[in-house]
Image: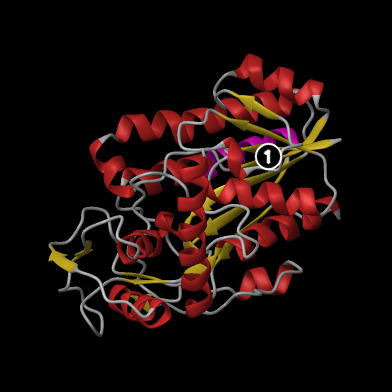
Amino acid sequence: MAILVTGGAGYIGSHMVHELNDAGEAVVVLDNLSTGFRFLLPSQVPVVVGNTGDQELVARTLTEHRVDAIIHFAASIVVPESVADPLGYYRNNTLNTTLLLQAAIAAGVRNFIFSSTAAVYGNPEHVPVREDAPTNPIAPYGTSKLMSEIVLHDAARAHGLKFVALRYFNVAGADPKLRTGQATPQATHLIKVTCETILGRRDKLSVFGTDYPTPDGTCIRDYIHVTDLARAHSAALAYLRRGGASATFNCGYGHGYSVLEVLETARRVSGRNFAVEYAGRRAGDPISLVADVSRIHATLEWRPMFDNLDTIVSHALAWERRLATKQAAR
């Protein structure tokens, strides 16, 4: 039996594939390679090129590889882009998830892990935010993920599918072994953009909004190391295999950093300064998103290994240097 990882050639997905491969699991990747890259993956892992909404391709893949669990990462994830192209996000995120679920249920897949987001909460009234807090997304990206969660709940109830939905907070860092990391050109993740600026690949870094009601006026986020996030998925899969009930968990560390605190950490870790441009607020950005992590710690056999902003930035910076070497050699 095998595990299908959709979007497995992307940033988080490729870390998941390495995590599963290291554990001796049989893995198959489904990715359209629009933002993913084969070179991020172990060479022996099969890659099926295509979309999660292609039900014929998905059905064939599930049968040929005897898939019994799916970890679903494939999605569009850029908040401002979702504001400009909401229909594209509903198609790629919500509709394709629905089509994937239909194929999975028809093939008898029993366990499904869904990549969700803290963006479903919008601007939460209470921080840290619990999983049972009201969901009120403020951008189509968050809405598309929330709609997918609703579809997943209803499908599981009707067809006996077991699932875990993991609501990510801000994912950052890179594989400590430098086998994979964030490789998407023009990525918008703060820590990646900061590292690119440090290394001279960008002239400057933009800070969007300095007038938020926070101690220094910039947004606050809960940053989780991507390797810890991949390990949380493994823990969720083990939980389902043990017969655990369907559940939703926040994935973060339970404390946050402002944009300016991240930039100061990057200066300290790298020993370099860099140009910063201050701009107005960006559409769809919540003020503060920090996870209440009591549920995931109480339920899953998972504890963070890299809960340190200096470590996260150091690994991200090391990956950016490694990525430049990889790209030069290709």
For the residue pair 54 and 293, the one nearer the viewer reads as 54
In the rendered image, residue 126 lying in the magenta stretch gets the answer no
Q: Which residues are magenta?
A: 149-160
For the rendered model, the colour scheme is: secondary structure
Query: For this view, does 266 lie left or right of residue 239?
Result: left
The N terminus lies in which quarter of the figure? Answer: top right
Taking 136 as reference, is 105 above or below it? above
Which picture quadrant has residue 228?
bottom right
The x, y position of residue 218, in whole percent, is 24, 74
Query: For this view, does 54 lie left or right of residue 143?
Result: right
Q: Residue at x 65, y 68 (%)?
A: 296
The x, y position of residue 132, in whole percent, is 52, 64
One can see residue 291 in this view: no
For the stretch drawn in magenta, the main secondary structure is helix
Q: Residues within 10 Å of mark 1 (few under 14, many from 20)?
A: some
How many badges with numbers are in the image?
A: 1
Identify which amino acid the numbered label 1 is placed on: Ala
Q: Residue at x 44, y 72 (%)?
A: 290
